[in-house]
Image: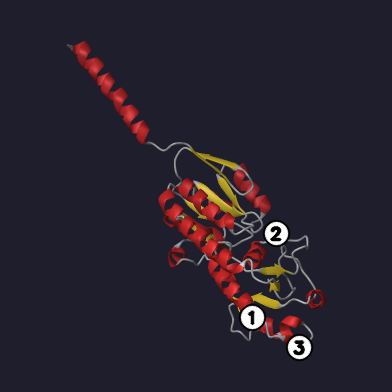
């Protein structure tokens, strides 16, 4: 009888182990934007986001509540404002990051300090490197964050909404008459974006042509003479000021420039275009409308 009880107890333990192991998470494998493979046994619960656009994508993927720390200017959505700040960028407080014992640290390849990123990896932290260069990279990142955080259902819905919005803009604007566009990224020094930048992809989406697409640097410094030589049809500045902002006003004396002559001087809130998160399509809505306005004039 005792032998039977012992056998029965062992059988119960064995079957219970099989049952609960079937409920555990399968191994999670995700590649970041530099093709580094991240392998997890369980979804992450403690995430550090080291740029504002990453914070926005994490919230869109349903992982906002898992962010334990972020950086200055991570102010969207509203809930992001309540997340503790650990540093700005490109510089980061490595000692503080390590002390928080994150399951995942998400960094920006061209925005965070590379040496510090590599230091985090050397210290054994799990690091995801983000570098969206095309609009489609954003919905892909939403899905990957959902997979890492175990919030696939929310992430999939967000990605689907993003894709549908993108398809609408592409079908509506991308095949219209081309408009030459100069996007002013900064004023002193005068900076723009090349063809590898995600904003250039937005310009193409709206049926525009980035006049500085062939430059080598992602955010090159240029001269006023180069802008004049481009004979751009439209000047768009990343500014959340009023229409008569200083950046736009500085172009008005150059009356022989086509964009100035036709008053095609526009501004867009930089948080909607410069940040490579889900709201970039709201910036695209605005840009497409402005290019259409210039196209009809």
Q: Nearer the viewer, residue 5 or 255?
A: 255
Do the CB atoms of the residues marked 1 and 3 lie less than 8 Å apart?
Answer: no
In the figure, 199 relative to 289: above or below?
above
Along the horizontal axis of the image, is 294 left or right of 163? right
- Classify mark 2: helix, strand or loop: loop
Mark 2 / mark 1, whichever is N-terminal: 2
- Categorize mark 1 by other alpha carbons within 10 Å: few (<14), some (14-19), many (20+): few
> Badge 1 is on which residue?
296
Estimate the x, y position of residue 251 in percent, counting from the top left: 73, 83
Real-space Cα distance between discs 1 and 3?
24 Å
- Categorize mark 3 by other alpha carbons within 10 Å: few (<14), some (14-19), many (20+): few
Q: Give the position of the N terminus as an image quadrant.
A: top left
Real-space Cα distance between discs 3 and 2?
31 Å
Q: Quadrant of residue 252?
A: bottom right
Give residue 253's mark.
3
Along the horizontal axis of the image, is 27 left or right of 199? left
Q: Give the position of the C terminus as an image quadrant.
A: bottom right
Estimate the x, y position of residue 157 in percent, counting from the top left: 43, 55
Q: Nearer the viewer, residue 21 or 124?
A: 21
Q: Is residue 3 visible?
A: yes
Real-space Cα distance between discs 2 and 1?
28 Å
Residue at 72% over, 77% down: 233
Give residue 130's mark.
none
Mark 1 / mark 3, whichever is N-terminal: 3
> Badge 2 is on which residue?
196
């Amino acid at each position: 009888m005792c032998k039977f009880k012992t056998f029965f107890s062992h059988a119960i333990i064995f079957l219970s182990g099989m049952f609960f192991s079937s409920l555990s998470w399968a191994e999670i494998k995700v590649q970041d934007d530099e093709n580094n493979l991240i392998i997890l046994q369980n979804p992450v619960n403690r995430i550090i986001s080291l740029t504002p656009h990453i914070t926005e994508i994490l919230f869109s993927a349903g992982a906002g509540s898992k962010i334990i720390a972020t950086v200055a200017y991570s102010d969207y959505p509203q809930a992001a404002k309540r997340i503790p700040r650990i540093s700005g960028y490109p510089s980061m407080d490595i000692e503080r990051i390590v002390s928080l014992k994150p399951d995942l640290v998400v960094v920006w390849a061209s925005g965070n300090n590379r040496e510090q990123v590599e230091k985090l990896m050397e210290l054994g932290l799990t690091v995801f490197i983000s570098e969206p260069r095309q609009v489609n990279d954003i919905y892909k990142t939403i899905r990957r964050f959902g997979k890492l955080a175990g919030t696939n259902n929310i992430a999939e819905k967000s990605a689907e909404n993003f894709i549908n919005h993108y398809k609408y803009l592409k079908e509506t604007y991308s095949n219209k008459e081309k408009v030459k566009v100069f996007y002013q990224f900064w004023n002193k020094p005068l900076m723009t974006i090349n063809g590898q930048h995600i904003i250039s992809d937005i310009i193409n989406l709206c049926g525009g042509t980035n006049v500085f697409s062939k430059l080598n640097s992602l955010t090159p410094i240029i001269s006023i003479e180069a802008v004049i030589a481009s004979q751009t049809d439209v000047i768009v500045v990343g500014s959340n000021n009023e229409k008569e902002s200083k950046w736009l006003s500085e172009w008005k004396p150059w009356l022989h420039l086509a964009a100035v002559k036709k008053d095609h001087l526009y501004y867009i809130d930089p948080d909607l275009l410069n940040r490579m998160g889900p709201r970039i399509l709201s910036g695209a809505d605005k840009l497409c409308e402005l290019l259409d306005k210039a196209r009809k004039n």
